[in-house]
Image: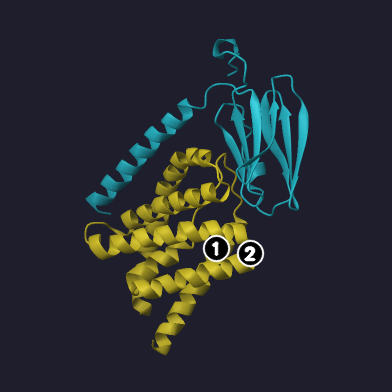
Chain colours: A cyan, B yellow
Amino acid sequence: MKKNDFILIATLLICSIIAFFAVNSTQTRQGGKVVIKIDGQIYRTLDFSATTHEEIIIENNGHRNVLLIDNGRVDMIEANCPDKTCVRQKPIQYENQTIVCLPSKLVIEIEAQIGIEESEIDIIQ
Amino acid sequence: MSNRKIAMLALLVAQAIILSFIERLIPTSFAVPGIKLGLANIITLIALYMFSVREAFLILVIRILLTSLLFGSITSLLYSAFGGLLSFLIMALFIKYARNKFSVVGISVAGGVFHNIGQIAAASIMVQNFKIVFYLPVLMISGVITGIFIGLIGKYLMKYMDRVR
């Protein structure tokens, strides 16, 4: 390995670690709304809180995904696509977090609940 | 193209397909989608050093098409192709203009990182959602780590490949 290799590796690592913390800082507030988008279009939105317990079945073009909202978190628990990447993703609960399912062009986003002032939102860590 | 060269290129394509297959057998579970070792990139790397850019490109295109046909889907074809092509372009440019400044490891790291950038770009265009870009920092870190690993393998393998040539 040459000196330039180390410079390249260090630069890339420093940049991505800074970006990682920058992204993380936008994902610290507990969200209150799940937005389900297919192909960029809103399919369904749903408000949720720590007490919401709901299973949502999303069916579109032969793709079937099951989303579970429980304990203030949103998790994809079932998918009929071959790769199951979305099922392996961790549950999400903070604003701006997403779960992606590429085969069905599905994105689950967490947003702040509309109508609630920031100070009134309980931050659950 | 000589018969010997055709046989060598076919051999590398076959190796790349087997490596893609082995990679599929390794279970990976991460919070972030898209993290993978990129074992087949070993072959692209070796091909870029041993053959011309055109020949290496041929190996890459045939490998992507065949692995998608054998084990993938249209979706995986689209975004692995995007990542693969961007990574190839970056590695080819590095080898052309900075071959003496970087070792195989550095070039492989650049390729790994740009593979993930291409993959995320393709994915966010496909689902028309740019919040996916938030996954990029983690994917870049994983690209650096897998890039080092792939580069080291490529480095040791190339000693033996030289004898074959």
Density class for disc 1 (Cα within 10 Å; few <14, some 14-19, many ≥20) is: many
Does residue B54 appear left or right of residue B24 in this picture?
left
Residue B129: x and y in percent read 55, 42
Q: Nearer the viewer, residue B151 or A17?
A: A17
Compared to residue A101, the image places residue B22 above or below, namely: below
Residue A121: x and y in percent read 60, 14
Residue A108: x and y in percent read 63, 37
Between the residue at mark 2 and the residue at mark 1, the CA separation in whole angstroms equals: 9 Å
When asked about the image quadrant of residue A41, the answer is: top right
Which residue type carries mark 2? Answer: Phe
When asked about the image quadrant of residue A119, the answer is: top right
Which residue type carries mark 1? Answer: Ser
- Label 2 sits on a secondary structure element that is helix
Report the residue marked by disc 2. Answer: B71
- Label 1 sits on a secondary structure element that is helix
Query: What's the chain of the residue with tag 2?
Result: B
Compared to residue A67, the image places residue B45 above or below, namely: below
